[in-house]
Amino acid sequence: MKNGSRTIRDVAAMAGVSVATVSKYVNGTQRFSPTVEAKLKDAIDRLGYRSNPLARSMITGRTRAIGVAILDISNPHFTNMVKGANRVALQHDYTLLLVDTEEDPARERSLIQALAPRVDGLIISSRASEEMAAWMLDLGKPVVMLRRVQGLAIPNVGFDNRLATYMLARHLLNLGHRHIAYLGFGAASINDERVSGARDALAEAGLALDIYDTHAPTALAGEQACSRVLLGPKRPKAVICYNDLIALGFMKEAKSLGFRLPQDVSVAGIDNAFYGEYVEPRLTTIDTQSEKMGELAVQKLIDALAGRADVEHVMLEPRIVVRDSTAACV
Amino acid sequence: MKNGSRTIRDVAAMAGVSVATVSKYVNGTQRFSPTVEAKLKDAIDRLGYRSNPLARSMITGRTRAIGVAILDISNPHFTNMVKGANRVALQHDYTLLLVDTEEDPARERSLIQALAPRVDGLIISSRASEEMAAWMLDLGKPVVMLRRVQGLAIPNVGFDNRLATYMLARHLLNLGHRHIAYLGFGAASINDERVSGARDALAEAGLALDIYDTHAPTALAGEQACSRVLLGPKRPKAVICYNDLIALGFMKEAKSLGFRLPQDVSVAGIDNAFYGEYVEPRLTTIDTQSEKMGELAVQKLIDALAGRADVEHVMLEPRIVVRDSTAACV
DNA sequence: CTGAAAGCGCTAACAT
DNA sequence: ATGTTAGCGCTTTCAG
């Protein structure tokens, strides 16, 4: 019963054929005489035999698995990507193997290096800069990155971060806001893009953007940053946050501080995490199409695996989701 | 530069030693003369050699990886478990390979069977019943389940679901509630335990529990179930939900329907997901110690891998987190 | 301390 | 249509 030790040889012996025959049968590489086929079938399920993919991979060089490394499994942005990736992978009969690097560069490297040989290709979400990510080129496996790393010849599917904050800023401008702040997460490389999008929109209106920073892309960090923003010398009437998590924390603390939302201060996030609909006021945000991102990444990787060339860079467009946390400036 | 094709033989050739020597050096199995050690070291990083874990596993039978199968990567309960599991695994120098079965039994089976041969042991979260999960015994690898499956000889770390809802019901009873409903998720096998905990508490007070069901453990399902509960013939004054997600949706819809929370209806969930603190009213819930669960599961698996026997069943205790969504019955 | 050789379970020519 | 055989990259006795 135990599959623990049944090998292709056991099956061959039991069915009275050669191991090659079993192999071909198992892989459907060839057709067989009904007699042999029946014996094979019988032997296989009597023995509960399952072919060992490791041994198989050693020869074929293919694992039929795709590795995905994400920065934080508790961040909905990443889990949505995984959902999308999983769907496409399964469609193509690939197994998605996930690894959570927990925003730790050292751990990221060792986990990815452990993952690489076990899969046919990798999808990586990382904060690493060009130099910090150079080792990824030596993985010996095709890689798709989940954002563009300048100067690195790795295909990627990214998101137009600049446009995202640009849109948010324009939205607030349209609502009559003049004092707009950006609460960012400087450790993320995409933070700069998000800053500049908002800054550009304000600049076009002859206004300046006030910039604040958090130490993590989490709700707690947003909470902790709130008083600094709202009780500081230049209190904004609208705040664009690095992501929904930070926005969530920010809003909670703002309410504790006695601010009414959105009358006293408008807040917007980025990600379109599901809980944005369940808080009060419902969060205005940017849909980053995370699921689509995962889908495209896998598609791209599968194409690469099949030797099909593909464009290097795919950029997804933001879509604003206006809800109740942003309102006209009074 | 490319690690793509460097084998132990390349290193041996370059260093002028045998493959056996390289192997022993790489694995630190033995000490070497300074001369050889230097040559080895040199050859290895000149070639950028990394040993192929697949080939290694074929012989040793060990992968140094642990497989984890979760039901839904976007459910915080599971991601918290992964966080805990990851921590302990890394401490012991194991790589955690994750797979999201998306609540689909067929997919669950094929994913787990694909995962099993690639890891030393598995941690599985599943809704499968005794018969449906019997195949897990044939994986040929040690397994730790993340809940108890009656009649199945698989070690597990579980959670006292009965006590959880019992506590919640007692809490509501203490607040003076007499009309208490349970909004469950019948497809989960633990749902029965949760039902009976609440029912027992009410029975002790001479009261009966009204039971409703959702089709999924999601916020959307909670939303959709709300009117049925609150606008039906026997409107409860307090509702215990299967989990925080359902509670979240339920609360949102209840507010839309014009109910004031918690004055008109008290709501409680289970899981202690982070967003419970960010909604209004803040959600009363049960801390299921998901992270701890992940930690214990990995610890248990590692013990099993090391041949150390261990207790079969570990049960974690619930802790109630009282916030604002439950209030005295008026 | 170092090396030769025998496989791990499987696939892929190449026979037959 | 089926079998033989040579490895994949590595570890592991067992000799030296």
Image (cartoon, coloured by chain):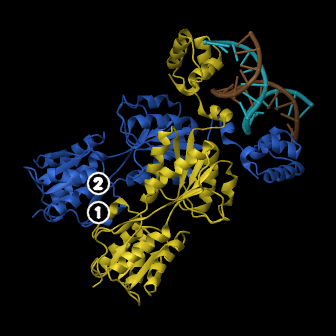
Chain colours: A yellow, B blue, C brown, D cyan
Neighbours of disc 1 within 10 Å: few (<14), some (14-19), many (20+)? many
> Does any portion of residue A201 appear in the rendered image?
yes
Q: Which quadrant of the figure has residue A17?
A: top right
Say which of A169 and A105 sits in front. Answer: A169
Q: Outermost residue toward the bottom?
A: A233
In the rendered image, residue B6, in percent from the top left (x then y), is placed at 76, 45
Q: Residues within 10 Å of mark 2 (few under 14, many from 20)?
A: many
Amino acid tagged 2: Ala
Tell me, yes or no, whether the two marked residues, 1 and 2, touch with CB atoms within 8 Å.
Answer: yes
The residue singled out by tag 1 in the image is: A278
Does residue A209 appear in this view? no
Label number found at residue A137: none
Q: Percent from the top left, x then y, of residue D13? A: 77, 29
Mark 1 vs mark 2, CA separation in Å: 9 Å
Q: What residue does disc 2 label?
A: B219
x and y percent of residue A155 in the render?
60, 56
| Type of amino acid at the residue the image marks with label 1 | Tyr
Badge 2 sits on which subunit? B
Seen at 41% across and 50% down, the residue is: B78
Report whether A322 appears left or right of B228: right
- Label 1: chain letter: A
In the rendered view, tell whether residue A278 sits above or below residue A142. below
Q: Name the residue located 76 percent from the left edge and 53 percent from the top edge.
A: B1
B175 relative position to C4: left or right? left
